[in-house]
Image: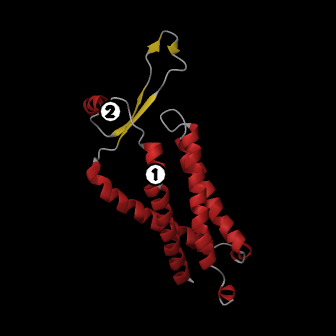
Amino acid sequence: MMKRVIVAGVLGFIVLALWTFVVNGIFGLRHTLDMKQVTNERQVYETLKINVPAPGRYICNPPITESGFVLNEPVFSVQYSGFGHEAAGRESITNMLLGLLSTLLAAFLLSLSGDRIFRSYVRRLLYFSSLGLFVALASEMGNYGIGGYPLGDTVIMSVETIVKWTIVGLVVAWWLKPVAQRAR
């Protein structure tokens, strides 16, 4: 059984990697959400370089008046990890390892599920869709708000996460089934 779980996890990772490549590499989803161009980018970059010397997440609020914050004025978020473009390779490897560990763990947890779930392809698939929904609610939706993403971008990222895990589930649920069903 453990061999089937590992193969299912690896197959799920391959699907995850292909999905990520197509959605982000070819269609540029993350690029359009995370890399919008700033007017006068060079000027803004030089200002940030001087004023944001340490890694961290910063908030730029509108000036406070005697009555407090002015409503309907923008609040800006600046995030600096402390890395430059030289870290892209390390980040890619880290993300690949996290993806592999995620699909292996999800396949393992599915293998531990009850007989009622494990004996039905649809229920195994719904397990992965539910996992995607959980990740979207716990992670992606938490990025919405002041200093985060606008609602539209957050919903897009959440839907992409649910679809991604459902597609991974199509393969894992197909491979990881009771032995009696595999012979058919």
Residue 109 or residue 87, whichever sits in front: 87
Percent coordinates x, y for residue 85 in the rendering: 28, 49
* Position above or below: 103 against 65: below
Asked whether, in this view, residue 33 is left or right of residue 166, the answer is left
Percent coordinates x, y for residue 61 in the rendering: 44, 24
Q: Mark 1 points at which residue?
A: 28
> Most extreme residue toward the bottom, as rendered?
183
Amino acid at circle 1:
Gly
* Position above or below: 154 against 112: above
Judge the density around disc 2: few (<14), some (14-19), many (≥20) Cα neighbours within 10 Å: few
Res. 50 image quadrant: top left
Q: Residue at x 48, y 66 (%)?
A: 18
Asked whether, in this view, residue 175 is left or right of residue 59, the answer is right
> Of label 2 and label 1, which has the lower sequence position?
1
Res. 80 image quadrant: top left
Q: Residue at x 29, y 53 (%)?
A: 87
* Position above or below: 143 against 91: above
Measure the C-alpha gap from mark 2 to mark 1: 21 Å
Q: Which element is circle 1 on?
A: loop
* Position above or below: 48 against 35: above
> Most extreme residue toward the front, as rendered?
26
Q: Mark 2 points at which residue?
A: 41
Quadrant of image for the C terminus: bottom right
Asked whether, in this view, residue 15 is left or right of residue 45, the answer is right
Percent coordinates x, y for residue 163 in the rendering: 60, 58
Residue 156 or residue 144, whichever sits in front: 156
Percent coordinates x, y for residue 182 in the rendering: 65, 86
Quadrant of image for the N terminus: bottom right
Amino acid at circle 2:
Glu
Q: Which residue is drawn at 47% across and 27% down?
A: 75
Q: Which residue is drawn at 47% across and 11% down?
A: 65
